Image (spheres, helix red, strand yellow):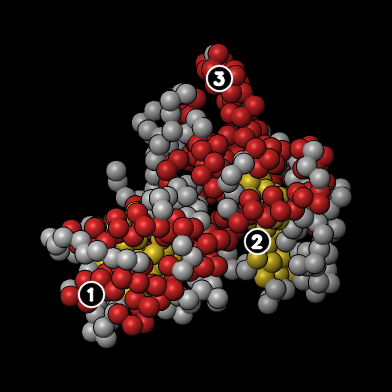
């Protein structure tokens, strides 16, 4: 499979590898984001050992790692009574020659024996020699474990790392390297797959989006058909309540009280479930971009587009898909027309972040009004208001007027002291009147689909 993106991370790893001295590098991120592929791409032309920790007992984990290290040297694995013996042997091998030892899914080992981090601290502090040029990579998908027990202040390994990578899904711009469609179709496709590499590369872009949904999502034997359920079962003992919460959010119930009412989960216990889903990076908290940290105007959104797509379209139609996938596909494609509008807002915000000097970008709402994009430059006291329209019709001056009216409701600094700008995004362009107005006004930018394509 072709390796996409992640060039800056490869450069960082290669840069560390060429430096003198020993390196401890930490790679983490949620499942399916491509950690293993990044590591394997990095080590493919180097003296290296790749080892994936299993979910076995600590004794078996230790023995298999020692066997893997010994086999690299063509030796019989030594008998080791505990992890201290094992890391002493591993350290000796890392001292003998320059080698990359990549330990994937390190949290599996921590789960079986939390003291393992102390043993690896001993390896780094006491066993590795001053002239060793080897590299140890610790990788994991359980983000809470990696952040707390590997990177955290109380971890025995704290302060030993020489670098870390928090690997995240591709944004839309990065995903375009994979999605070989026109921009309009790419926006629709990104609504389905999002930027998670496994989901992106599952599609065959020589086929239509409908064919890909049919073959790679609706096929009962496909990887993606039950992917969210499988993902949650890997992370959680009992995923049923988490499934209900994700389905509720996907259907537009985004506040704590709405989620509680829809799922029947008491608000007193719901908080813990929401926190866990945030830790897994499946959902995120959102506040109006102008709100303070203490503001209670909080909603929850699903972060991954495919997880959202699945709960919106697959979960409620499982029986229909098994009975008649062709009919289910038509229904999904009909609903997708509405769902893609939210993706278009997401992409438009991405453009503002990348192409302007606004330092804070998000959306805004109150009890009666919503604005798709509000961006702030707090230092220069500038604020931008934006609206996005994924419709067949051209956008006219009414949208601009409505946006200007809503902007009056946004409380941020003193209106007389702030500089205001406006941006409109439209799938099918703008009326002549609005285009003329945009030419005459320095505070107004309009973006057609082709403009977005050029900018990204």
Give the vertical position of 40 relative to 237 (above or below).
Answer: below
Name the residue that disc number 1 marks.
92
Q: Residue at x 47, y 55 (%)?
A: 141
Residue 5 in view: no
Residue 187 x/y as whole percent: 53, 40
Residue furthest out toward the top: 323
- In this rendering, the label closer to the viewer, 3 or 2: 3
Name the residue that disc number 3 marks.
321
Residue 213 shown left or right of residue 62 in the figure: right
Q: Quadrant of the N terminus?
A: top left
- In this rendering, the label closer to the viewer, 1 or 3: 1
Between 152 and 182, which is closer to the camera in this rendering?
A: 152
Instruction: Name which of mark 3 and mark 2 comes first in the sequence.
Output: 3
Mark 2 to mark 1 CA distance (whole Å): 50 Å
Residue 376 in view: yes
Residue 397 shown left or right of residue 11 in the figure: right
Q: Give me the disc on residue 361.
A: 2
Q: Please rate how many residues cluster around mark 2, counting C-alpha atoms within 10 Å: few if below 14, some from 14 to 19, many from 20.
A: many
Instruction: Name which of mark 2 and mark 1 comes first in the sequence.
Output: 1
Q: Residue at x 55, y 19 (%)?
A: 321
Q: Tag 1's secondary structure?
A: helix
């Amino acid at each position: 499979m072709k390796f996409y993106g992640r060039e800056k991370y490869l450069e960082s790893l290669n840069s560390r590898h060429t430096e003198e001295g020993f390196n401890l590098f930490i790679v983490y991120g949620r499942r399916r984001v491509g950690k293993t592929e990044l590591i394997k791409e990095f080590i493919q032309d180097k003296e290296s050992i790749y080892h994936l920790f299993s979910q076995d007992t600590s004794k078996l984990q230790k023995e298999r790692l020692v066997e893997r290290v010994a086999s690299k040297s063509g030796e019989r694995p030594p008998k080791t009574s505990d992890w201290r013996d094992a890391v002493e042997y591993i350290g000796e091998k890392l001292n003998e020659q320059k080698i990359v030892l990549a330990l994937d899914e390190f949290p599996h080992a921590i789960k079986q024996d939390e003291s393992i981090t102390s043993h690896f601290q001993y390896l780094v502090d006491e066993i590795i020699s001053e002239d060793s040029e080897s590299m140890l990579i610790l990788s994991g998908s359980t983000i809470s474990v990696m952040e707390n027990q590997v990177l955290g202040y109380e971890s025995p390994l704290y302060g030993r790392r020489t670098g870390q990578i928090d690997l995240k899904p591709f944004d839309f711009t990065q995903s375009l390297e994979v999605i070989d469609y026109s921009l309009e179709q790419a926006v629709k496709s990104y609504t389905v797959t999002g930027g998670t590499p496994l989901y992106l590369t599952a599609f065959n872009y020589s086929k239509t989006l409908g064919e890909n949904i049919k073959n790679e999502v609706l096929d009962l034997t496909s990887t993606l058909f039950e992917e969210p359920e499988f993902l949650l079962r890997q992370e959680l003992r009992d995923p049923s309540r988490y499934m209900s919460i994700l389905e509720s959010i996907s259907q537009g119930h985004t506040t704590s009280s709405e989620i509680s009412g829809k799922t029947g989960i008491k608000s007193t216990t719901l908080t813990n479930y929401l926190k866990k889903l945030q830790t897994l990076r499946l959902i995120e908290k959102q506040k109006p971009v102008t709100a303070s940290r203490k503001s209670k105007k909080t909603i929850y959104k699903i972060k991954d587009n495919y997880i959202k797509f699945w709960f919106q379209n697959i979960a409620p139609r499982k029986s229909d898909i098994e009975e008649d996938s062709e009919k289910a596909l038509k229904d999904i494609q009909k609903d997708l027309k509405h769902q893609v509008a939210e993706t278009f807002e997401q992409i438009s915000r991405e453009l503002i972040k990348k192409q302007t000097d606004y330092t804070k970008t998000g959306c805004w709402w109150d009890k009666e009004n919503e604005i798709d994009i509000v961006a702030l430059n707090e230092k220069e006291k500038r604020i931008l208001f934006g609206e996005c329209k994924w419709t067949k019709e051209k956008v006219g001056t009414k949208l601009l007027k409505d946006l200007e009216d809503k902007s009056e409701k946004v409380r941020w600094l003193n209106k007389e002291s702030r500089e205001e700008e406006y941006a409109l995004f439209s799938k099918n362009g703008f009326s002549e009147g609005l285009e003329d107005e945009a030419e005459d006004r320095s505070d107004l930018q309009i973006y057609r689909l082709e403009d977005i394509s050029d900018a990204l």
